[in-house]
Amino acid sequence: MTGVQPERGAGQEVISDAPLLRVRNLHAHIGSVRGVVRAVDGVSLDVGRSQALGVVGESGSGKSVMARAIMGLMPPRSGRSGEVLFQGRDLLTLGRKELEEVWGKQIAMVFQDPGRSLNPVVRVERQLTEGMRRHLGVSKSEAHGRALDLLKEVGVPDPERRLRNYPHELSGGMRQRVMIATALACEPDLLIADEPTTALDVTIQRQILDLLRRVQVERGMSLMLISHDLAVVAGRTDRVSVMYAGKLAEIGSTRQVFDAPQHRYTHALLGATPTIDHQRHTPLRLISGSLPPPTNLPPGCRFAPRCEYALDACTDPGPVMESVGSDHDVACLNRASSDASSMVGDLVGR
């Protein structure tokens, strides 16, 4: 797999050629009454130091399960295999106590629903300062000052008052900002943001996304931004990976993938995304069919049953990830033409 050299984003400086996070052949399965759900099936990717990686795909493609498998937050009746090397240390080999030393201090996560992630009966200050006092060993007064600074950094007005609030006393956008502040409290090297703007209105969505990008650049940390919305990652990431039914379809620099999508699924996703210059009263292009059931996945390319360009070889034996350029890999046997997309400028501008 190519692309281990991290791409520099605006205002960023790459510290080392070695990726901060290196995922190799990651598998994650969950037991269900209908059988084993192979939610993540052989995913390999890198997150460079001070780099933002976008992970996109339809709901049910395995993005969130991949993030939880990396963190070690899988539900009961589940399993993981492969390698998740964080700063050279395989997280899959760590026990619960060892992982607790990684969570928050080295890797932090912003979940989809802050209303469920924040403790409803604990004031904001305690939720912000608990991790600091445990991992950083700061005093109560110092933790209070750092909590105030964090709320200011993420744009929470009247932070002294908000520290005394319970989560239910805050708006959805305010709760998400508190969640981000909590994730940043111990100055992690990697922040995983899993659909961080779910259920927020579009104005607040943009504020939260711009906040994540700004904080990531200013702190020089790495970011994994997970979303089903291509426009979310287009202007806020350095690299992007496209997932479908538990597998990676395409990965490369954001500009390469959006300017010249090679996988037919990536091309179809871009074609189905509305843009500002879309002609009025004309239907959007749709992707026919739906994701295959995760307990009964098709052989070969998972997208083949929905792809009008599928070949016999797409299902037997199916494609493997191949390099199509510098830092651009794709798993497709009948790739789209290099000029397939003409909408990247519209998406990046959103």
Image (cartoon, rainbow, N blue to C red):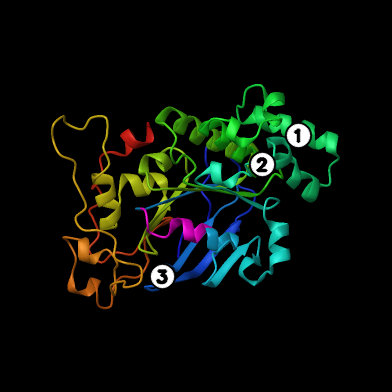
Three-letter amino acid code at disc 2?
A: Val
Figure label count: 3
Count neighbours of disc 2 (C-alpha within 10 A) and say few if under 14, some if 14 to 19, many if 20 or more. Answer: few
Tell me the quarter of the picture where residue 278 sits.
top left
For the residue pair 341 and 168, the one nearer the viewer reads as 168
Assign a secondary structure to mark 3: strand
The percent coordinates of residue 88 (x first, y second) are: 65, 64
Assign a secondary structure to mark 1: helix
Which sits earlier in the primary sequence, circle 2 or circle 3?
3
Three-letter amino acid code at disc 1?
A: Arg
Q: Nearer the viewer's eye, disc 2 or disc 3?
A: 2
Q: Which residue, as the protein is rendered here, is positioned at the far top?
A: 158
In the rendered image, residue 17 lying in the magenta stretch gets the answer no
The percent coordinates of residue 348 (x first, y second) are: 38, 36
Tell me the quarter of the picture where residue 32 sits.
bottom left
Q: CA distance from mark 1 to mark 3?
A: 42 Å
Q: CA distance from mark 2 to mark 1?
A: 22 Å
Rendered-image quadrant of the C terminus: top left
Q: Nearer the viewer's eye, disc 1 or disc 3?
A: 3
The disc label shown at residue 37, or none: 3
In the rendered image, residue 62 lying in the magenta stretch gets the answer yes
Count neighbours of disc 1 (C-alpha within 10 A) and say few if under 14, some if 14 to 19, many if 20 or more. Answer: some
Tell me the quarter of the picture where residue 341 sits.
top left
Tags 2 and 1 touching, CB below 8 Å: no
Which residue in the structure is indicated by mark 2? 121
- Magenta range: 59-67
Which sits earlier in the primary sequence, circle 1 or circle 3?
3
